[in-house]
Image (cartoon, rainbow, N blue to C red):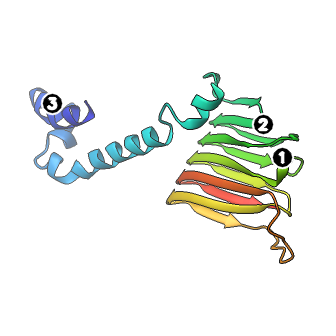
């Protein structure tokens, strides 16, 4: 629809060229076609990040809610932030993972009071678009980061503890970041 509107606008405006002179001028499409591609790319990226049917929604049966929501169920945490910011300390004795979405906002996630049962692993899925996420983890946790970034930064500011044994709890962070910042601290 956007493509059709882009290409047909100069034709429709030829009836009244004084309405928007830069659109009717020769070579509008030749000079500004890349704007259409950028718009389409941004729409595709946002659709991929927030596509329906991801495994957390299927597993936990989350309900779609307000723009800023937080839910906790059976060791899984879900938080959605849109055009705002939040700082939360999570208290969970059987932390298994979660899903954190941030669009044009910031989240500060404090997991230092959480415990992963049986020295197992917990998986967090993070989606950040034009935002910032800071995650605080206990110093004894082993953290594995698997993120895909587009014009984004990832800062691991944890103090490295060389005396960690193989029996530590493991946190796996999977994420997609677009024009954003992800920071891990202990």
| Residue at disc 3, secondary structure | helix
Mark closest to the chain's N terminus, 1 or 2 = 2
Where is residue 110 drawn, in percent x and y?
82, 48
Height in image: 76 above or below 150? above
Mark closest to the chain's N terminus, 3 or 2 = 3
| Residue at disc 1, secondary structure | helix
Residue named by callout 1: 117
Q: Please state which of the two labelled residues, at mark 1 or mark 3, is closer to the viewer.
A: 1
Q: Please state which of the two labelled residues, at mark 1 or mark 2, is closer to the viewer.
A: 1
* Outermost residue toward the bottom in this view: 162
Height in image: 128 above or below 58? below
1 with respect to 61 (left or right): left
Q: Residues within 10 Å of mark 3 (few under 14, many from 20)?
A: some
Residue at coordinates 76% horizontally, 29% vertically from top-left?
73
> Which image quarter is the C terminus in?
bottom right
Mark 1 touching mark 2, by CB under 8 A? yes
Where is residue 151 drawn, in percent x and y?
50, 60
Q: Residues within 10 Å of mark 2 (few under 14, many from 20)?
A: some
Residue named by callout 3: 13
Q: CA distance from mark 3 to mark 2?
A: 58 Å
Residue named by callout 2: 75
Where is residue 92 drawn, in percent x and y?
86, 40
> Which image quarter is the N terminus in?
top left
Mark closest to the chain's N terminus, 1 or 3 = 3
Q: Which mark identifies residue 69?
A: none
């Amino acid at each position: 629809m956007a493509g059709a509107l882009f290409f047909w606008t100069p034709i429709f405006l030829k009836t009244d060229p004084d309405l928007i002179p830069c659109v009717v001028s020769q070579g509008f499409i030749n000079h500004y076609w890349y704007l259409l591609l950028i718009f389409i790319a941004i729409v595709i990226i946002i659709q991929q990040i927030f596509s329906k049917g991801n495994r957390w929604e299927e597993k936990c049966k989350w309900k779609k809610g307000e723009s800023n929501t937080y839910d906790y169920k059976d060791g899984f945490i879900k938080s959605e932030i849109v055009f705002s910011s939040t700082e939360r300390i999570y208290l969970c004795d059987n932390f298994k993972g979660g899903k954190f979405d941030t669009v044009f906002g910031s989240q500060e996630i404090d997991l230092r009071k959480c415990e992963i049962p049986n020295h197992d692993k917990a998986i967090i899925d993070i989606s950040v678009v034009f935002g910032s996420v800071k995650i605080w983890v206990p110093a004894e946790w082993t953290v594995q980061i698997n993120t895909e970034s587009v014009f984004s930064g990832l800062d691991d500011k944890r103090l490295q503890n060389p005396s960690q044994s193989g029996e530590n709890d493991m946190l796996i962070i999977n994420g997609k970041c677009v024009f954003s910042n992800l920071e891990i601290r202990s």
